[in-house]
Amino acid sequence: MLGYINPDYLVGGALKLDAVLAATALQTRIANPLGMSIGAAAYGAHQIAASNMIRAIKAVSTECGRDPREFALFAFGGNGPLFACGMAASLGMSRVMVPPSAGLFSSFGLLYADVAHHYARTFRRLLRRSDLREIELAWHGLADQASEQLATAGFRGNAARIRRTASLHYAGQSFELTVPVPDGRIDAAMVAYLEEAFGQEHEKTYGHRAGADEPVELVAIQVVGEGLRARPNTMEKIRSTRVEPSAQAPRRAYFGRHHGWQATPILRRADLGTARTGPIIIEEYDATCVIPPGARATCDAASNIVIDLFDHAAG
């Protein structure tokens, strides 16, 4: 209803959409009862869906002490590029990246991701009063389990990697933070390192940290055993061999109250060899990318669509 998705080209045209039935349902069940135009009603539904995804981004950014404005938004999945620019604008982010074959990204991840086995053991101890030898032996035990499981799967030597982490909190807290633990003996120097690393993470996450005399409690120790695959050049593997349709005539698309309905060019990723200014819609077999008015888009050397947002209003 917003004009973003081509009803005749979803999954290369294999899945047909009934635009008339969709318009009828939206008009009678949502737009009319709310006294809204069909465009405003559809855009409101679009924003609700985006807000749900924005909450997920905040859970791994602002709620963890990370400012999303310092990052680029990486958009993947069939719907990611459809929502990404509006989400980025709402979060104050200025750049969006859309990889090649974005709709197949999870499949590629499954095929090419390294193997990882996670092990953990609860270990409630005040760090400064702990039997450090006991903790070190426990970590060695988890690492041995990880190494054995990796070896069973054929990962040995340089193909196997062990990483340690620790979950810590200040004594009396009901929640903990996890920090990486470098290789080496668990001794007084390591205790000092872990207390400082936890203090820095606590300040980054919550905006404050306790004084140096505040005891830090170890809650759990963890080990991740990673099996590193020998992989080919994945960039060459994900270049699509599917022939995309030629650029089409513009179609009307709705970009919120600020921009309204606009005649929007329908292009291919290959058409972004030189920078173009939105509104633009990029149609591909596995995803649709919406570039709003005022945003600038181009393709980099790896065929990622790079979108820079400037004065785009979220609507």
Image: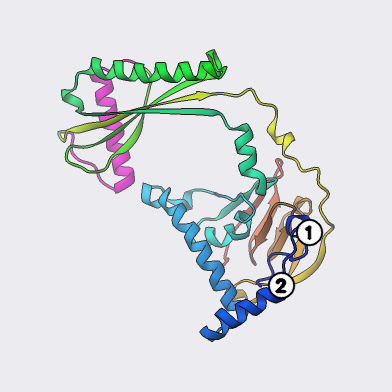
Q: Indicate the position of residue 243 as horizontal and vertical percent values.
A: 83, 49
Residue 98 lies in magenta, yes or no? no
Residue 315 makes an appearance in the image: no
| Label 1 neighbour load within 10 Å: few <14, some 14-19, many 20+ | few
Badge 2 is on which residue? 19
Q: Indicate the position of residue 303 as horizontal and vertical percent values.
A: 71, 44
Amino acid found under the numbered disc labelled 2 = Ala
- Element type at marker 2? helix
Residue 278 image-quadrant placement: bottom right
Quarter of the image with the N terminus in it: bottom right
- Element type at marker 1? helix
Name the residue at 77% across, 50% down.
Answer: 273
Name the residue at 53% across, 58% down.
Answer: 88
- Please tell me whether residue 23 is drawn above or below residue 310 in the rendered image: below
- Please tell me whether residue 241 is drawn above or below residue 37 in the rendered image: above
Q: Indicate the position of residue 182 as horizontal and vertical percent values.
A: 37, 23
- Please tell me whether residue 276 is drawn above or below residue 28 in the rendered image: above
Q: How far apart are labels 1 and 2 at the CA level?
A: 14 Å
Residue 208 lies in magenta, yes or no? yes
Quarter of the image with the C terminus in it: bottom right
